[in-house]
Structures are given as C-alpha cells and as structure tokens.
Amino acid sequence: MKKTGTMLAALAVGLLTSTAALAGDVRIMWYSDGVEGEVLKDLLDRFMKENPGINVILDNVSYSVVKEQLPVQLEAGNGPDIARVTNLKAQAQHWLDLRPLVADAAYWDENFGGQADWMRPDGSNQISGFMTQITIAGGFANKTLFDQAGVAIPGKDATWDDWAKAAKQVAENQQVPFPMALDRSGHRLSGPNLAYGGNYIGADGKPAPLDEGSKNFLKTFVGWVADGTMSKDVWVSAAGSTYRAAADDFINGQLVYYYSGSWQVPNFSTKIGTNFDWVATGSPCGPANCTGMTGGAGLVAVKYTKNPKDVVKVMDYLASEPIVKEFSERTLFLPAHKGVLAKGLDFKTDDAQAKAALNAFVEASKTLSDEARKLPGWLWSDAVYGALVTRVSQAAAGEMTVDEAFARIDSDIATKVKDSGN
Amino acid sequence: MVAVRLAMGAIDVPLRWVQRRLGIGGMATFFLLPNMLIFGIFVLLPFFINFAYSMTGGTALFLPDRTFVGGEQYARLFDCVNYTDPNSCAEDTFWTAVGNTAWFVVLQVTLMILFSLITALILNRELMARSFWRAVFFFPVLLSPVVVGLIWKWILQRQGLLNFGLYGLGFDPYTWLNDRNWSFAATVGVSIWAHMGFYTLILLAGLQAIPKDLYEAAEMDGTRPARAFWRITLPLLMPNLLVVVVLVLIRAVQIFDEVYVLTGGGPGISTLYITQYIYETGFATQLRNPGLAAAASILMGAVLVVLTLVQLGLGRKGEKKGARK
C-alpha cells in the first residue's frame, strides 16, 4: 500500500512538473533563406538563460510550410505561438493584438509603425508583430561573366530591355545556359509590372483588371521565356502558385542576371564566396519608373496561444533595439526598426560584395513607387500574385496564349474575391 | 502453452457471457463491430463531412463557419461549353487535370500490368540468383514516394545524371522535365518503376499456385508454350490479375506524391493530376476553396467506385463463364 502511494505521488509530481513546463513553452515557426535561423537560435538561447521560466522552441521549417500549412493550422484555431510570415495582411485576423500586452507600445509604434498596417486588420491600430527584415526586390549580375565577355554592366537607369540584351550577349559569349531568370513568384513579377506602368488596385480598393502596363511587361516576359532570354526552367517547373527560386543557378555560375531580392545577399555571400564576383543592381527601369517591390517577413504573435504573457516577453525581447541591431548585422538583413536604421549598421561580414549589395538595395529603396509601397499592406496582393504565377507559367509553357492568360488572370482574381465573400 | 491456455480461458468466460446475451447469430456482428467502428470513423464519417463541405462556399475552414451553397460547387465544376476543350470551362484547370489523369490511367494501368506480368513470368522461371532478382524488382516499393520523386528528378533535370551521361557520349543535354511529353512519360515511367514490384509479387504468387502437372500434361500433348500461356496461365491467373487491375487503377487515379516532387504538375499544368488539383484548390492556393476541392474529390471518389464495380462485375462474369465451361 505504501509502495503504491509512493508511486502515485511520484506520478502526480511528474505530471505537475510536465504541465508547468508546458505552461512556459513558446513555440516559434520559423523559415530561413540564409543564416537567420542560426542567429535567432543563438539570441533565443540567451533569452532563455535570462528567463529560465520560459522555454522557447524554435521549429525551423521550409517556406512552403509557412505558406501552405500554417494557414490551415490558423483556420483551425491552432498553430505556433509566434510565426515568421510573409503573407501578413491576408491572415491578419489570426494575429494577437500585442498593444495592451507589450511593455512599451509607444516604442513599437515609433520604430515599427511604418509597416504596422501590413500585418493588422484594416482600420485597427493593432500591434501584431514586427518586420524581421525589409526586403527590396532587385537584380544581381554575375560580374565575372560580364568582364570575361567584355560586355559593360548596364548602368543605373538601364531598362529591362537593356539588361535582356546585355545578358543575352554575355550568355552567348560565355556559353552559359541562362541569360536571365526571375523567381517564380507573383511578387517578383509585380516589380517590373509596376515599372511598366501597371496598377493592381481598383478605385474601390479591390483588384482592378490587368491594365496595359502589366500586360506589356507580361507579354515581353513570356516572349523572353520563349526565345530563351529568360530561364524557362524556373517558370515551368511547377503548376499552380508554387514558389521556385533561381538562386542555385546563379550560385552555380549558370546565370548572367538574376532578378530576386535583398534577402539573397547573405545566401550569396555564404555560398558564392570568392568563386566569382557579383553585384546587386537594383531594379531595371520600365517606361513608367524604375521600381522594384518591397515586402519582407514579419514575426507575428498568434492569437490562439495559450501563453500570451510569455509570448509577449519573447516578442519584446526580439523587437528590442540591441537585438534587432545584432540580428540585422549578423544576418545581413535590412531592418525595419527606425532607430536602428537611423543609427546605422555595421554588417558583420568581410565580404565587400555583400556590403556593396546591401548599400545598393538601400539605394534602390529610394526609387520604390507609391504603388509598390502600398501592395504589402493590400488585402488582395496574394490573390493577384497567385493568379499571375499560375497563368503566366501556363503561357510560358505554351499551354495558352498570353491573351488567354490575361483573361484567366482577371477571371481567377474575380472568382477569388467572390469566394472570399468580401 | 500454459500461458496460452490461461489466456484462452480468460477470453472464454466473457465471450460465453456475450454469446448468451446476443445469441450465436449476434456473435458475427459482435466480432465485426470493432472493424465497422474503425471503418465508420475513419472512412464513412470523413466521407459525409467531405460531402457536407462540397455543399458549402467561402474560404473559411471550419464547417460551421461556411455558407451553404447547395450544388453550386458541382455546377461550377461542370460549367463547360465543351468538355473536351478545358479552355471552354469555368474551371479549366480541373478539366485539364481530369484529362491528364485519364491519359495517365490508361497508359499507366496498361503498362503496369504488362510489365508486372512479364516480370512475374520471368521471375517464375528457373533463373540464376532468382531471389536476388526478385529483391531487385521489389526494392523500389520500399522507398518513400518523396525519395522516388527526388531520385528521378536528380536523374532527369537539366544538370542531372541522364544529361551527364548523354553529354559524355557526345549528345546535347535535353531539358526532359521542361518538355510536356517527356514530363508526362516520366510520371508514367517513374510510377511504374516505383510500384511494379508489388504487383509483380501478387502475380508471382498466382503463378506459383498454378499446378505444375497442368503444364506437364500440356507438354505431353504437344501444346506450344504460347498456347499454354493463353489457355492455362492466363485463365488461372485471372483472379490475381483482377486484384492487380483494381489496385493499380485506384492507385493510378490517386497519383500525387512522387509526381508532385518530380514535376510539381509542370511544365505548365501538363502533369497536374486530379489529386494535386484537389490539394492545390483546398490547401495550397491563396484564398483556398475547400468546398470546390471537396466537390472535386467526391467526383473522383464516384468515378473510382464506378470503375471498381465495373471491374468486379466483369470479373464475376468471367468466373461464371469459366464455371459453365
């Protein structure tokens, strides 16, 4: 009897301790483009040492998990406590309002206020989280290939046509398979669409039908895929709106000009090293302007958390000025924090190419159009991006004409708007 | 032995009590109950929930949050001017996926059965290292579909093993997975490679169950091997073949995993099959539509049921015909 009693007592203690451990757990869903997962882990280890009652669990997942599986978890009222997300506005109803919980809401407003609307429901003053990085879409050129081919790298005001012409010359001269590549992403297509005068937002705030500006670039783009100027591999390698990057082709020296964005800088710095010289070029110009797209990944708290007090402690820590500064300097990310930006950054890299690239992207941020600045906080951005990718890749694969693709893009977006009930 | 007797005794007492209560006739139901419960919870209940989803609209995931729209999702799927031209349909992607799946099923099922049968016939002969060859053919079955997809992607992609070999032989590399015909062929070929071993095993078991004396008698009568195959092997293998046809057919209609990894449904949507369409519509696309995905999956299920019933009907007809002879 005594033995049984002891066993039951041990079981009860065990259960109590395990429940206590669960109460202090904060789970973060995180994806990485480069080294940011390792940097974050290091920062969180420090946080846990300072806050022994909080156990932060970092789930490193692929971007597709965040894009495809997290929304389902959120709809079911589940999910992690904190998540790193790019589709911020469309899922804003799932984010926890940190305003009444954070230590100093004014600090958050002052430093992250510029992007706060990207991640909160329209019309609210909610603090949902902060941007872990601000990204600017832009191009990268393989300088070594240009030098070897004896072709001058197009200048600051060069157009998309100028880049296409130069990249093709280099590819032919150097026997490289791809002159140009653009990630299979609606966000990436949107930079040049806007540069060609495109505008997605209608007068009523809902998606407008594709206009001549967007159509002009998309026609050019599909033509480039057809004649081999633009890598076909990236665009026809999947159906639907699946994301595909051409970063590996650039890293392997198989690509002359790659249109992606600032988040690739740490990736290139690590993987290219001294294999060849590369430069960031900003966004090529179109007839309307030289804009790229802005955006980025935000760290948001999920409102279904059972542990909001600990979640807020983690969020306050990660959003604090010294941590944002350290995170940005070590990951080579452009921060969103106003104070950090004002005081300047000392990026922790010996790679002069990476430093120059980051400066080029800071410079490119000055040429962003108003439209480009609006899109990250627009509810329908992802619906438009998804339709663009799906149909443009079908046109690129020769399954439909460009005009058929345009008609389908408009009808797909209209159906999405109708389905959403908005 | 004592433990077994003790266990049997322990089971015997409650079972006799149940039998007294239910009667002997009720015992069959009693024994089937656990299986029926599992079937009900994991098959029938999801089916009805899925059907309920197919009658709702909107992007919400929870059924109570969704709006009842009746047969609107089915009407949308069938909104077509000409069913043979997907571009004339409101849901052109669905009809393209249906067409792709139909071609895939026809080709894959035919070739799978043909290759499985030929392999089984060869492995049934007195071969050197027969066990080794049987293991070789069965090995891909043990691989995860994702591994299968990745292996073949690494072989077929632009800088893959196949192009490396071709380049070494002086040929130009080719982008196999960018070509709609080669991509389609690759999905058929890879799925056959991955699953053939399993069906070969079923047919091999059937071949080994055919009495040897039938072949000896045929040989003594001077029957040619081809005639023996058509008159002895094939008729006696028919029950196994029927099982294989049903299994291959169901698996072919449901094809998803290895193709998703290998081609992602591309180039364009030329290898987009119906299961991937359902997945993309319900889960992967921005502003997903679970109702439309559920309607498509109900239609796919209905087609599978019809095909299976037709096959079973044909099988029974064949059996009766055989019995009459």
Image (spheres, coloured by chain):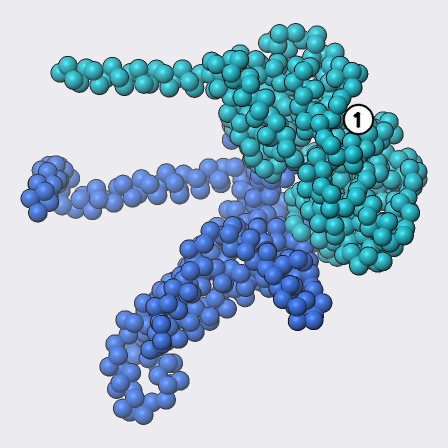
Q: Quadrant of residue B34?
A: top left
**In the displayed structure, does residue A340 sit left or right of residue A37?**
right
- Callout count: 1
Taking depth in this image into account, of A130 and B82 the one nearest to the observer is: A130
| Horizontal and vertical percent position of residue A174 | 82, 57
* x 67%, y 8%: residue: A105
| Amino acid type at mark 1 | Lys
Chain the render paints blue: B
Asked if residue B263 shows in the view, the reply is yes
Q: Quadrant of residue B162?
A: bottom right
* x 40%, y 43%: residue: B43
Q: Quadrant of residue A386?
A: top right
| Horizontal and vertical percent position of residue B210 | 28, 74
Rendered view: A75 above or below A305: below
Rendered view: B29 above or below A417: below
Chain the render paints cyan: A
* x 15%, y 14%: residue: A2
Badge 1 is on which residue? A374
Which quadrant: the C terminus of chain A? top right
* x 72%, y 12%: residue: A109
Residue at disc 1, secondary structure: helix
Rendered view: A379 above or below A171: above
The disc numbered 1 marks a residue on which chain?
Answer: A
